[in-house]
Amino acid sequence: MFDTMTTTKIVGALCGTLLVFLLAGWASETIYKTSSGSEHNKTQAYEIAVEGEEGTEVVVDEGPAFAEVYATADVSAGEGLWRTCRACHALEAGENGTGPYLIGVVGRDVGAAEGYGYSGALTAVADVWTPENLNLFLENPKGYAPGTAMSYNGMRKIEDRANLIAYLDSLDD
């Protein structure tokens, strides 16, 4: 079907095409290369001067303080958020699961749940589970207490954390 000459022509055509593409790439790099070597020019083509630009500080809005959000927390919304926690925690005293029981956790000493073996990382960062400490822990457990055994990634919304903590606080008088 194919003789040697046809196969040689096909291979030659492929090699020639590859050579054209390589030469085109080399030529475009040479044309668009800046005078500083292989680095591309990273400055703006033009700049617009703005009056009063010097000394302007960028203010980062961190959102409302936790105390303000916690004061208006919705307990019923926190009850809905509890569903994700109950996979590892229980609300009955002394009934530990993968994590310790959480009844009475707000205001309880850190590492004081009966019958649960803590990793020790939590007691190094806080003494009492205040709403503020719980907020920081629930936001990023591994970041707040490096070495903690809790594998939860955290709650990103401050409102969700406040609602959950309010729900846990409402369970015990």
Image (cartoon, rainbow, N blue to C red):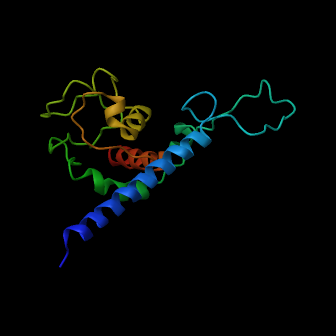
Where residue 16 appears, as percent x and y from the top left, is: 39, 57
Q: Which residue is drawn at 79% across and 37% down?
A: 47
Say whether residue 172 is left or right of residue 115.
right
Quarter of the rendering occupied by the C terminus = top left
Q: Residue at x 80, y 25 (%)?
A: 54
Say whether residue 58 is left or right of residue 14.
right
Quarter of the rendering occupied by the N terminus = bottom left
Q: Can the viewer see residue 64?
A: no
Direction top: furthest residue: 124
Q: Can the viewer see residue 74?
A: yes
Where residue 123 appears, as percent x and y from the top left, is: 27, 23
Q: Which residue is drawn at 19% across and 43% down?
A: 93
Direction front: furthest residue: 5
Where residue 136 appears, as percent x and y from the top left, is: 41, 34
Image label count: 0
Q: Residue at x 57, y 40 (%)?
A: 30
Could you say which is closer to the camera, residue 81 or residue 61? Answer: 61
Could you say which is closer to the camera, residue 91 or residue 47? Answer: 47
Direction right: furthest residue: 51
Where residue 83 appears, as percent x and y from the top left, is: 29, 57
Say whether residue 62 is left or right of residue 118.
right
Say whether residue 61 is left or right of residue 104.
right
Could you say which is closer to the camera, residue 128 or residue 4? Answer: 4
Asked where in the image residue 169 lies, by quadrant, the reply is: top left
Asked where in the image residue 48 lies, by quadrant, the reply is: top right
**Where is 154 relative to 107, above or below?**
below
Could you say which is closer to the camera, residue 45 or residue 164? Answer: 45
Asked where in the image residue 79 lies, by quadrant, the reply is: bottom left
